[in-house]
Amino acid sequence: MNQLKTVALLGLLAGLLVAIGYALGGQGGALIGLVIAAITNIGSWYFSDRIALAAYQAQPVSRQQAPELYQMVENLSRQANIPTPQLYIVPTPAANAFATGRDPEHAAVAVTEGILNLLPADELEAVIAHELTHRKFWV
């Protein structure tokens, strides 16, 4: 359902760019608006993971830096029969986690320092499992 909403929103914004282009420059302006919309929509899709991670200043995490967290994500990914995503930590005290990426093969899961400090291992595992379900059902 979220993908449908995203497609509808991007379509609406593309239509708005084409309409503004047409209003400002006729058919040539509409074509320019269409090209701009196509470039921004494709760029947003292709770089969605990098955009989200950069917005939150997320830092990549290696197995050596967070072995328990890394093992937890690997185990859950294996159980879900999906590729293990890249793992990131967001340097903020707020408790949050999110999954991002254009498809399961190009995905990332990020957790905040706040959620790592707040939740016990079993609850953190449940949160990460929830985030991985977003990846599992991407089409």
Image (cartoon, rainbow, N blue to C red):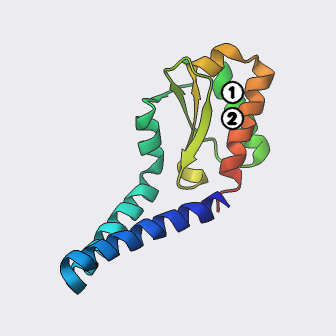
Q: Secondary structure at mark 2?
A: helix
Task: Give left or right: position of 84 versus 52.
Answer: right
Q: Where, quadrant-wise, is the C terminus in this rendering?
A: bottom right
Q: Along the line of sight, which residue is nearer the eye, 19 or 87?
A: 19
Q: Where, quadrant-wise, is the N terminus in this rendering?
A: bottom right
Q: Along the line of sight, which residue is nearer the eye, 76 or 30?
A: 30
Tell me where residue 31 appears, x and y as whole percent.
27, 80
Q: Is residue 42 above or below residue 121?
A: below
| Quarter holding residue 26 | bottom left
Q: Secondary structure at mark 1?
A: helix
Tell me where residue 94 appears, x and y as whole percent.
58, 21
Q: Around disc 2, counting alpha carbons within 10 Å, would you say few (fewer than 14), some (14 to 19), or many (20 or more)? A: some
**Mark 2 and mark 1: Cα distance apart in space:** 5 Å
Tell me where residue 113 appears, x and y as whole percent.
57, 19
| Quarter holding residue 138 | bottom right
Label 2: which residue? 74
Task: Give left or right: position of 50 versus 27.
Answer: right
Q: Residue at x 46, y 50 (%)?
A: 48
Label 1: which residue? 71
Q: Around disc 1, counting alpha carbons within 10 Å, would you say few (fewer than 14), some (14 to 19), or many (20 or more)? A: few
- Regarding residue 61, the answer to whether it shows in the image is no
Identify the mark at residue 91; answer none if there is no mark: none
Q: Along the line of sight, which residue is nearer the eye, 49 or 28?
A: 28
Find the residue positioned furthest to the bottom. Answer: 27
Q: Are marks 2 and 1 in contact (CB under 8 Å)?
A: yes
| Amino acid on which the number 1 mark rests in the picture | Gln
- Regarding residue 108, the answer to whether it shows in the image is yes
Q: Is residue 10 above or below residue 27?
A: above
